[in-house]
Image: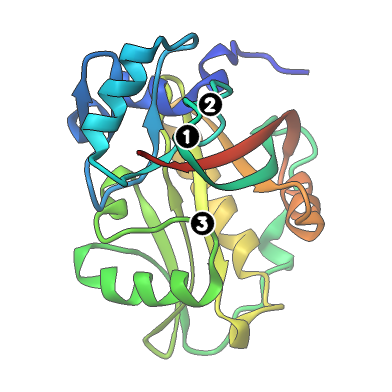
Amino acid sequence: MLDRDTVALDDPVAESLRGPHAHLARRLGRAAGYLPEVASFSAVSGDPDPAEWDDLARLLGRGGFADLFSCPATPPADWEPIFALDGLQMVFLATGRADVTHVAHVEPGSELVELGADDVPEMLDLTARTRPGPFWPRTLELGTYLGIRENGALVAMAGERLRPPGWTEISAVCTAPEARGRGYASRLVDALVTHITARNERPFLHVAEANTSAIALYERLGFAFRKRVTFRGFRTP
């Protein structure tokens, strides 16, 4: 049972841009989005009128990409649909959280590290190979990112993305093919949960509904289903 108000999670992009990520936002009228190379997510009000869609189109530019995340509003007919993906939103409940210390295989020469600007080229390479979701040259600015290195090479990572007030999203959870099966995803998510809860915030995350293995992992780590979402992307006229 959820023991904290979850309303902010109904529109996490807009809530983040109005709150902790305001310094990473660009705006025009009531339309908003993240700065280029930080994230592609855009936000409009719950019931946008044509003028608001025009503002978002001008904000993104002709033929710009509008990642509306889980926003339910439907753009005008001349906006080209790019993708739609069914997903789940999950929140951390703590109860039933697995002890991952016996799950993670500590490979000789491996270490958990906090990633910084100098690590971005490797982070971009890892996310390009594993495709955990959108990751750009400045995505690191959204929050704390942790990685696991084996003999110096970055083989797994996860980090903080959306920040609606009181909550922090865990995202970009990925492991290189050659390092899978060692419990690195569990180790990273668990470390981020500890980091987030230490500042009295609640972790949450999103996962593709078809990714049943990831869903099972997150459930073992103390996450529970909150609602279904549909991620959608469009091209502006």
Dot 2: element: loop
Label whose residue precedes the other's in the sequence (2 or 3): 2
Q: Is residue 19 visible?
A: no
Left/right placement of residue 220 relative to residue 205 reads: right
Residue holding disc 1 = 68
Q: Nearer the viewer, residue 70 or 206?
A: 70
- How far is mark 1 from mark 2, CA to CA? 5 Å
Q: Mark 1 and 2 residues: CB-CB less than 8 Å, in contact?
A: yes
Which residue is depicted at the point 47% across and 25% down? 76
Image quarter of residue 193: top right
**Picture colour scheme:** rainbow
Using a 10 Å C-alpha cutoff, classify the residue at mark 1 as few (fewer than 14 neighbours), some (14 to 19) or many (20 or more). many
Which residue is depicted at the point 60% across and 79% down? 106
- How far is mark 3 from mark 1, CA to CA? 14 Å
Q: Nearer the viewer, residue 87 or 198?
A: 87
Using a 10 Å C-alpha cutoff, classify the residue at mark 3 as few (fewer than 14 neighbours), some (14 to 19) or many (20 or more). some
Where 137 falls versus 21 (above or below)?
below
Label whose residue precedes the other's in the sequence (3 or 1): 1
Q: Is residue 53 visible?
A: yes
Image quarter of residue 183: bottom right
- The amino acid sitting under disc 3 is Gly
Residue holding disc 2 = 71
- The amino acid sitting under disc 2 is Cys
Left/right placement of residue 27 relative to residue 115 reads: left
